Amino acid sequence: MKIRINGVDADIQLETEQNVGEVLCALDAWLNGTGHRLSGLSIDGEAAHTGSMEACFGRTVDTITTLDIYTTPVLQLFAESLFNTIQDINAYEAAAFEEKGRFAGQWQQSPQALLLAEHSPDLFNWASQTFSGEGSGTQVFRVLVEERLRELQDPAAEMSRTGPLVSEICARLEELPLDIQTGKDARAAETVRTFSGVAEKVFRVFDVLKTEGFPVGEITVENMPITAYIGEFSTALRELLAAYEQHDTVLVGDLAEYEMAPRLRSLHAAVVELVTRREL
């Protein structure tokens, strides 16, 4: 049996696989490593569809001349899921009251919901709450989904847009010890919350670029490979949030001023550099 992936002959030697289902299971780990997912299947020129998929999986390899496997980049599938979720928001807003009551359960079975659950559990949970009539409402959720979609479609613009916010939040981190000492609790809480959100955004854009195959290994931050730097950044961020929850004001102030502010500036600059290389 000849195996082709996206129309190209694949140098794959079968071992113990007896049917198409076993072949696809064996290829699953390899596909995940390439950042792609199975999106289509054809046996001897006949495309599989939803109704015939079970029969296709059961076909034995010795009855097949050519197995065509089609894949799609997972980031493209994720972007499509976000776009479809925006359409779901529109549908929910237009739905009658009794339809809204059933919307969340039906949505959770959709392809976009299943992909969000796997790749973005926070968005999945937010969507489930929104479509259940809970949470902050559809407009807040719409803004969030549109932001995530922009990160996938135009990470360079998102990093450029984030630049002024990074400068502002780093300045506020340096002021955080004084805010805590002078009882400005609301401002301190907002600073920590905003900083966490900005840092997570930079992490997400980095992950997009890494998944797309851009040379993240060539980027260093303060003479450290960027992946190792992100690991240390994440550890320091968890320490900051834990110290804040425990009301350890001295540690919060020290971490914010001397660790997190300079680290965020450096990391943001490194991701901007990586985005710039992507655009060339």
Image (cartoon, grey):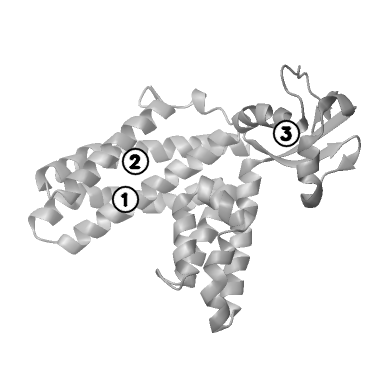
201 sits left or right of 186 in the view: right
Disc 1/disc 2 C-alpha distance (Å): 9 Å
220 sits left or right of 211 in the view: left
Tag of residue 21: 3
| Amino acid type of the residue tagged 1 in the rendering | Phe
Question: Mark 2: which secondary structure?
Answer: helix
Tag of residue 136: none
Question: Mark 1: which secondary structure?
Answer: helix
- Image quadrant holding the C terminus, namely top right
| Amino acid type of the residue tagged 2 in the rendering | Leu
Q: Nearer the viewer, mark 2 or mark 3?
A: 3
**Is 153 placed above or below 98 here?**
above
Tag of residue 195: 1
Which mark sits nearer the N-terminus, 1 or 2?
Answer: 1
6 sits left or right of 172 in the view: right
80 sits left or right of 208 in the view: right
Residue 204 at x, y percent in the picture: 47, 44
**Is 130 placed above or below 214 here?**
below
- Image quadrant holding the N terminus, namely top right
| Amino acid type of the residue tagged 3 in the rendering | Gly
Whether residue 109 appears in this view of the structure is yes
Tag of residue 264: 2
Residue 114 at x, y percent in the picture: 57, 52
Whether residue 256 appears in this view of the structure is no
Are the residues flagged by discs 1 and 2 in contact, CB closer than 8 Å? yes
Residue 199 at x, y percent in the picture: 37, 45
Which mark sits nearer the N-terminus, 2 or 3?
Answer: 3
